[in-house]
Amino acid sequence: MKTPKQINIFIVEDNKIFTTALKADIESTFSKMPIKLHSFETGETCMLKFNQIRPQVVVLDYHLDSKFKDAANGLKILDLIKKENPETNVIMLTSNDNLEVAIKSLKHGASDYVVKTETQFLKINYSLSNIFKIMKSKNEIKKYKNIAQFFIWFFAIQFALAVTSVIYTLVK
């Protein structure tokens, strides 16, 4: 049986306690999956490792400039992530329930938007679960597309050989 590919998840959050708790919750919830978690306090440090690791998922805090005043906010980092790799799934986190921020995040390419409340970890894990299902479906589609292309080429070559054989027989 084929070993599943490792899933890299970046957590970009300037609150270390929240990050530690979130990492523990994700590891516990998805303990049977090949997940590797990487955490960063700023979007800038996240982007330094982004192209090297190429995460499939980023859990991104909107207010990254609360602890580090010169840090870019989550929306700017979201734009950088999507510019580097549009396929990366981004779950935007925020401490305030602001519809305008939610709409902006989704328009900029976030896969989901989660407000930090007492059910935040449950919502993040639900979102991750959905993302993993979509990733699996995309891989299945790619696999079947490759199989279909193989058979098309195989039959095209068989047809070409048959036509060549008939022409060769007629010319002879």
Image (tube, rainbow, N blue to C red):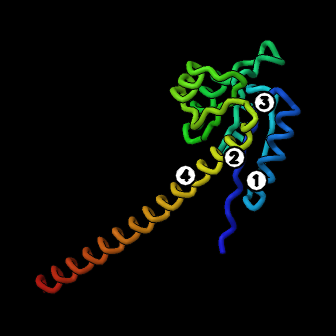
Residue 76 point in image, percent of width and height = 64, 21
User: Marks 2 and 1: in contact by CB < 8 Å?
Assistant: yes
Sequence order check, earlier mark of 2 and 4: 2
Which of discs 1 and 3 lies nearer the camera? The answer is: 1
Which mark is first along the chain, 2 or 1? 1
Residue 13 badge: 3
Q: Which residue is mark 1?
A: 29
Three-letter amino acid code of the residue under disc 1: Thr
Residues under numbered marks 2 and 4 in contact, where contact means CB atoms less than 8 Å apart: no
Q: Which residue is farthest top?
A: 69
Secondary structure beneath label 1: helix
Mark 2 or 3, nearer chain start: 3
Please, which residue is most extreme toward the front here?
118
Picture coordinates of residue 62, whole percent (x, y): 69, 24
**Looking at the rendering, which quadrant does residue 44 occupy?**
top right
Instruction: Determine whether, in the image, residue 47 is placed left or right of residue 112.
Output: right
Which residue is under mark 2?
Answer: 125
Amino acid type at mark 4: Ile
Q: CA distance from mark 1 to mark 3?
A: 20 Å
Q: Earlier in the sequence, mark 4 or mark 1?
A: 1
Amino acid type, label 3: Glu
- The circle on residue 134 is 4
Numbered-mark total: 4
The residue mark sitting in front, 2 or 3, is: 2
**Nearest-to-viewer mark from 4 and 1:** 1
Q: Secondary structure at mark 4?
A: helix
Q: Which residue does the image show at 69% across and 46% down from the upper left?
A: 125
Q: What residue is at 78 percent from the left and 13 percent from the top?
A: 70
| Residue at the spot 53% in from the left edge and 24% down from the top edge | 103
